Image (tube, helix red, strand yellow):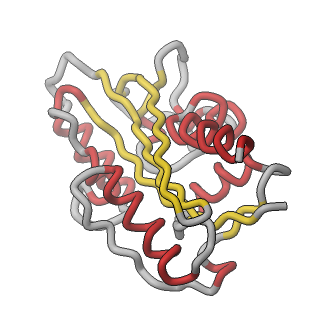
Amino acid sequence: MQQLVFATNNTHKLEEIADKIAGKIQLLSLNDIGCFDDIAETGATFSENAAIKSHYIFNKYKLNCFGDDSGLEIDALNGEPGVYSARYAGKHGDHGANIRKVLERLKHADNRTARFHTVISLIWDGKEHFFEGTVEGIIRNELSGTAGFGYDPIFQPLGYAVTFAEMTLAEKNSISHRAKAVDKMIEFLNAV
């Protein structure tokens, strides 16, 4: 079975993608390859941040790998938090503070439309390939659900009456932005 390194320390992302590619490719984490470096996301776009991660791992370890960057784009906030989704309120990974900031900024907004967007940068046999996925939805007025991570408790995908945080992992993985990008990557890998 082919091995593929996912350039992330986010255990939630690892769990989601491992579930998607189970039996197809052996997914390795940064811990699995002995990488404990903090790869700084200094890009101005999702594509740049994804590429920073994949190039870092490929250049240092010479392994097939991919990096992703994802974020929430809210129309009433001109696409914010976007590339700054994980650190929107200041501290990286403070999901509660990020959600509070979004809800505060949307307090008087009639337009609640938003989308999650993912870009994957895959380096396979030394060549880079990009895959994208989006899921449209709305931002709820309050949190609902305990599953998932990040903005999942306030994001309700179009066509559903529940948030990502109220879905099982399998349900979320059937429609999410990351799942769509991963499906495209798997389709590519199945063809090589």
Residue positioned 54% across, 66% down in the render: 126
Image quarter of residue 167: top right
How many numbered badges does the structure rendering display? 0
Q: Is residue 189 left or right of residue 161?
A: right
Q: Who is closer to the viewer here, 121 or 98?
A: 121
As displayed, is residue 127 above or below residue 28?
above
Residue 113 in picture, x, y percent from top left: 30, 21
Residue positioned 22% across, 18% down in the render: 111
As displayed, is residue 158 above or below residue 30?
above
Q: Is residue 153 left or right of residue 82?
A: right
Going by the picture, which residue comes out furthest to the top? 159
Q: Quadrant of the N terminus?
A: bottom right
Q: Is residue 84 left or right of residue 93?
A: left
Residue 14 in picture, x, y percent from top left: 63, 59
Residue positioned 34% across, 59% down in the render: 49
Residue 91 in picture, x, y percent from top left: 28, 67
Residue 136 in picture, x, y percent from top left: 41, 23
Residue positioned 63% across, 37% down in the render: 183
